[in-house]
Amino acid sequence: LPMTAEVKGDHLYIGGVDMVELAREQGTALYVMDEADMRHRMETYLTAFRSRYENSDVVFASKAFINKAAARIVAEEGLCLDVSGGGELAVARAVGFPMDKVFVHGNNKTPVELREAIEAGVGCIVIDSRIELDRVSKIAGELGVTQSIYMRITPGVEADTHEYIRTGCEDSKFGFTMREDWAFNCVKDVLAAPNVRLAGIHMHIGSQIFALHSFKEAIKVMVELMARIEAEYGYRIEELDVGGGLGVAYLAEDEPSAIDDFAECVTSAVREYCAEFGVALPRLLTEPGRSLVANAGVTLYTVGILKTLPGIRKYVAVDGGMSDNIRTALYHAEYEPVIANKADQPRTEIVTLAGKHCESGDAVVVDMPIQHPDLGDIVCVFGTGAYCYTMSNNYNGQPRPAIVFVKDGEARVTTRRETYEDLMACDLD
Ligand code: LLP
């Protein structure tokens, strides 16, 4: 639940705003973000790390959620920003995000994107391959600058999560593999390359991770690599980025690790292995996306169709679906729904919230308890703040929903709803 969710009368309120009224005013489907919740988590992350490890920073992974308003909040809260290409970089630039706090990711950043990033003066480009090293080196040379870079390492650790979002294992398109000493050997090329400065190494082992031990195992691999680089190349790696991946609760019974436990695990692992391998403590970065925004967000829908298939299931069709939340169809993701205008009533029926798209797999939630549904009810689906808007699409000509930030009883539209004109904005006559 968003931090400020509460029931008043029979209505659900978030950020002091009545969700039923907001849905009537703004229409549905509608993304709503609890601004206090987002800010609180950002603060919690920074405090959790800085109180344990002074020389640390938190980098918000904008792929989880980004619009201009969110980018401004990230800047105000003092976090750095991870962009995974030219588009996210453009949002950061549009709001004047401090470019020295921007990290550029991606396994195939185009030469154009790389040039844009280097020209903009980004703090760090995370190099994902040998070929990319040469590209960055060449472009930085042409622009007459020395670009700080990290090397993304694939530590060969299997995180305990869905295979599509597991990224640290050996068979991965991301990063420099540790197999056959490839990563270690490439460090020599990186150190010899002109116009770049190897500032750090980076890992990201996956997403929606509950068990913290994989982070610890991967950090061991990384610190050991730092020690070898120092011993054999005489070069000190000054920064270590342990990526994101902390899981969140989508269902009441989910028990993810707390931000504090994650920070404790990571910082103590870094200290322990640095002592063990004789490495000076690096600047430490973590790169969370989901755990900063997932629980801050909800999606509001209106019930349009009710269909009971006796002995099979009850379908409640809403005015959105895989266009605004593809995670259910893609990963069998699960969410908790509630009827916002019956929030005080018990959830007595098991229903499937179907979307409005032309695909059987199009559902927002499958077989979950909810209050007795009627036509026109406003359904609120919790936990949709991460990877819903950023993965949204226009399937079946569906305009993207608006995004409203709520705080202290005020609702602020931060991204307007798309129009039919927007759908055709790029079409030429
Ligand atoms: N850093 C890097 C380099 C990443 O690739 C990611 C996520 C993150 C940080 C942030 O990870 P988080 O803290 O959000 O777990 N679309 C999927 C998730 C894909 C995650 C991709 N990388 C989903 O909806 O579950």
Image: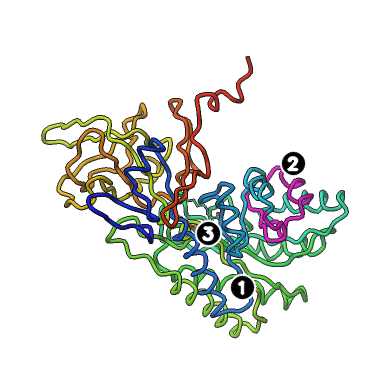
Which amino acid does the dot numbered 2 rest on? Val
Q: Are marks 2 and 3 in contact (CB under 8 Å)?
A: no
The tag earlier along the polypeptide, 1 or 2, is 1
Instruction: Specify the label residue 112 is tagged with.
Output: 2
Q: Nearer the viewer, mark 3 or mark 1?
A: 1
Q: Position of residue 409 (x, y in %)?
A: 41, 54
Q: Is residue 179 visible?
A: no
Instruction: Specify the label residue 284 is tagged with.
Output: none
- Report if the beta carbon of the residue with label 1 is closer than 8 angstroms to ligand 1: no
Q: Position of residue 273 (x, y in %)?
A: 57, 80
Residue drawn at the location 32% of the way across and 50% of the way down: 335
Residue drawn at the location 52% of the way across and 68% of the way down: 43
Secondary structure at numbered mark 1: strand
Q: Nearer the viewer, residue 104 or 292?
A: 292
Query: According to the image, label 1 marks what residue?
Result: 56
- Quote the CA–CA distance across marks 3 and 1: 22 Å
